[in-house]
Amino acid sequence: MKDIKREIKSFLVTMVRHVIRMSPFFVNLGYAAKIEILSIIFNEKTGDNDRLHDLATYKNIGSDYRRVLRGFDTSRLGQYLAKKAQKTKARRKKYGTSQGTILFATRSWHFIEPVFQSFVEKGVKCEKYDINEFDKKFFKEHKINNKSKYHREKAFKNLAITFRRKQSFNKENRRYTSDFFDKFYKESDVIIVDWLNHNTNWVLENTSADKKVIVRIHSYEVLSFFPATINFGRIDGLIFISHGIRDMFLEMWGWLLPDNMSTTVIDNIRCKKRVCPDASVSITGRGKTIGMMQYALPVKDFRFAFEVFKRVYEKDSEFRLLLCGQTLAEMKSAENALLLQEINSLPEGVVEELGYVTDVDSFFRRVGYMLSTSEREGSHESIIEGMAYGCIPVIRNWPMLAPFDGAKRAFPMCEVVETPAEAAEGILRASLDYKKVSKKYQSESAGFYSTDIPQKYLEFIERVRCNEYT
C-alpha cells in the first residue's frame, strides 16, 4: 500500500510539474517553485522528501550532479530565477564600495562564533545578532509550533519578496527585533550569515539592497532545496568551508549565480586552547581503541564504520570501539535497531556507547583511531581535533563528495579508503607501530590550526566591499 501511495504521489507531482512547464502563462512564483522543488526532492524509494540526501540518487552519474535536478536548471522557472538574479545584481552595482561595521547574523553559532571572536580580538568593528531572538517573539505571537514547516513555507514566500525590483527590508519585522539590532544594522555595511538556508532567507528579507551580504556554505545546504529559493543577486560573496563543497555546489547550483560572484574557500577557525594533547597522560590501551563521534546520524553511515571494526576485531580481539554522541537507541530507525542487535551479540565492553559527553578531552585520550565513514562531510572537525591528540585518522572517500575529491582535499596527508576492508587493513598496519604513526598525524594536525584564517576572512570581506569579483 505504501509503495502504491508513493507511486501515485510521484506521478501527480510529475504531471503537475509538466503542466506548469508547458503552461503558456507564468503561474504564482512561490507555487511553481514548490512544485518544481517537490519533484526534485521527493524520493520514490523512501516516500520522504530526502532524495537529494540519498546516496543512491548520485549513482553512476560521475560529477554531473546537475542531472539530479531533473531539468529544473533549463526549465522556464529555473531560467527566470537565474535571469532575475542577474538583473538584481546589475541594479545593485550603483551602491559602489562601502565602509562600516560588520554584522554577524545567524541562528547557529557553533562555527561562526570563533570568526566573530577573532575579529573582536583584532579590534575589528563588528557586532552580532542572534536570529533566535527574533524567532522567539515572532513564533510566540503567531502561535507557531512547527518551526521547520514554517521555515520551509517561508522560503517559498521569500521568492516573491527577494525578487522584487525595490529591495527594501521588511519594516513590519522590526517589531520583533531589538533596539540594539536596529543600531547595529544602521551602522553596518556588511552582513555575514552562516548557512545557506532559512538563516540566509531571513537576512535577505530583513536587509535592504545597499547592504553587502556574505554567506558561509556547508555540505547540508548544497543538497537541500534552499538554493532554489534564494535570489543570489542579493548576495555579494560566498564562503565555502571546503574545496569539495564549493565544487559540488557550483556543479549543482552554479547556474543560479550571477556573473562574477565572489567566492572563496576558507577553513573553520579552530581553537587550539580547546585541545590539550599531552601524550604523557593518554590512557593506556588507546592503541587498540577505535573512536567515532555522532555515529548514530544516518549521514555518518555507522554501518560502514561497524563493518570496519568487525574486520579489525576478527584479526585482533584486543580492539575496542568507543562511541560518543546520541546513541543508536535514541536515533530510532530500522537500521540502527539491527546495528544494536549486532553490537549486543558481541562480548560485553567490546563496543561502548557513551552517549553525549561534555568532556571530549577524556574521550580523545582514550581512543587511538578516529573514524570518518560519512556519506558526506565538510571538514569533519572531530577528526581534526582527534589528530591533535595523536589519534590516527581513518578517512573514507566520502561518496557524495568523491567526484570532487572532497575527502582527499580535506585530508591530503591521509590515504582515503573505499571499502571497510581497506580501512581495517590500515588500522591493523598502523597498530604495529602505533606511537610512530600517531606522532606523525599529531604533528601534521598543526596545519589545521593556522593563525592566518581570520586574516583570510578580512581580506575576502574587503574584496566584497570594493566589488572585486572573482
Image (cartoon, rainbow, N blue to C red):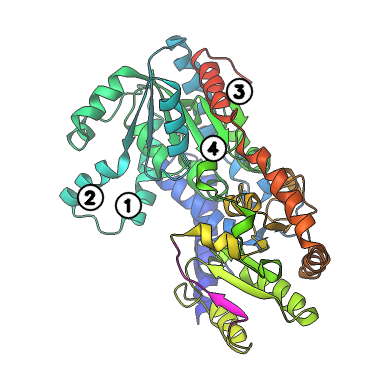
Neighbor class of circle 2 (other Cα within 10 Å; few <14, some 14-19, many 20+) is some
Numbered disc in front, either 2 or 3? 2
Neighbor class of circle 1 (other Cα within 10 Å; few <14, some 14-19, many 20+) is few
Gap between marks 1 and 4 measured at Cα: 32 Å
Neighbor class of circle 3 (other Cα within 10 Å; few <14, some 14-19, many 20+) is some
Residue at the disc numbered 3: 259
Amino acid carrying mark 1 in the image: Tyr
Amino acid carrying mark 4 in the image: Ile
Amino acid carrying mark 2 in the image: Phe
Mark 3 residue element:
loop
Residue at the disc numbered 1: 150
Residue at the disc numbered 4: 269
Whether the residues at callouts 2 and 1 have beta carbons within 8 Å, the answer is yes
Gap between marks 2 and 4 measured at Cα: 33 Å
Locate residue 324, reporting x and y percent. Answer: 52, 67
- Disc with the residue nearer the chain's start (2 vs 1): 2
Asked if 443 appears above or below 50 in the picture, the reply is: above
The mark found on residue 270 in the picture is none
Numbered disc in front, either 4 or 3? 4
Mark 1 residue element:
helix
